Amino acid sequence: MPIVAAAPPVAVTPPGGFDYVTIDSVNRRMYAAHGAVLLIVDVDKGSVVGTVQLGGSAGSAPNTSTGHVYTGDGDAKALSEVDPVSLKEVQRVAVSGPVDWISYDAQLGRIYGDEDDGSQIFVIDAKTFKQIGSIAIPGHHPETLQINPATNEMYQNIATDNEIAVIDRQAMKVTRTIPTAPVTNNHPLVFDAPYDMLVVGGGNKFSGYTSAGKLLWTIDFPGRVDQCDLDVSRQLMACAGGGITLFKINQNGPATIVGTLPMTPGPHTVAIDPKTGDIWAVWGTRPTATAPATAFVQRFQYKP
């Protein structure tokens, strides 16, 4: 298998499961939502920097210009700004629902947090750290949110409706939708800006669309899939679910699987470091009659 461990797994405290993983390639940090804390890892040293207690953390979005990271508290219904150097929460704003995925819009200076199993996206001004609006979305199970830096659009996966909601981020409203059948129960979504391509997965399928909504291709996927992350410089997309699967994104044809690494237990969230191409995964185990709960972070490499 061309995906290999680049270092041994590093144990994380406290034990338990994880949600989304993101990487700040400029400030060389990896962030992983880990229950009630945000895990921070130095991706160059491969060591755990520390954790920040927040409560019900799910998504994260780094601000590469400040070195800070935005995340959410799903339990208290809030978004937070965290300083990864002091390991402290520096700002917090309350919203009307639990927060799941988070994206930072550097062009408009906004933070977007979609409502977990809800029907809106919270919009926060990054300078004032106040909510400036919300975006009503169809369905009630938003998943991944992606920003198109070349247009005013962003794209929100809607799992319940098997579609992608296209949002005017200046006007903060949905302008159209892209049906994703035969992909169902949409979960991962990436936007490949150089190819102007949306890649969405779910229901044992992956499909590619233009940003205008034209279906380009569909492929089968042998198993469940959760989070995916795209390295646009290498055109490689890593996906979690029963292990790690690596896709090659092709401009003139369907994506192809170039590597797999089965894992038990398998991670459901991964990220690719765009500087090195390393793949980072996190996972946890439940306690059993003979073993306590655990949590790990590990770095992998693609060796074609």
Image (cartoon, rainbow, N blue to C red):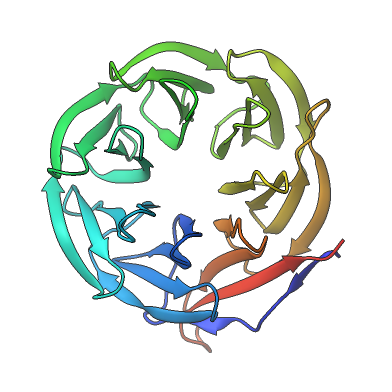
Q: Residue furthest top?
A: 176
User: At which x and y percent is residue 35?
Assistant: 34, 65
Residue at x-position 62% and y-position 35%: 202
Please identify the quarter of the rendering in which residue 174 is found: top left
Left/right of residue 298 with respect to residue 90 in the rendered view: right
Q: Residue furthest bottom?
A: 290
In this view of the protein, can residue 224 be seen by the observer? yes
Please identify the quarter of the rendering in which residue 19 is found: bottom left
Q: Quadrant of the C terminus?
A: bottom right
Please identify the quarter of the rendering in which residue 8 is found: bottom right
Left/right of residue 208 with respect to residue 134 in the rendered view: right
* Image: 185 above or below 224: above
In this view of the protein, can residue 226 be seen by the observer? no
Q: How many numbered discs sit on the rendered protein? A: 0
User: At which x and y percent is residue 122?
Assistant: 24, 34
Residue at x-position 76% and y-position 46%: 247
Q: Quadrant of the N terminus?
A: bottom right
* Image: 137 above or below 20: above
User: At which x and y percent is residue 10?
Assistant: 54, 83
User: At which x and y percent is residue 221?
Assistant: 76, 40
* Image: 260 above or below 108: below
Residue at x-position 32% and y-position 75%: 51
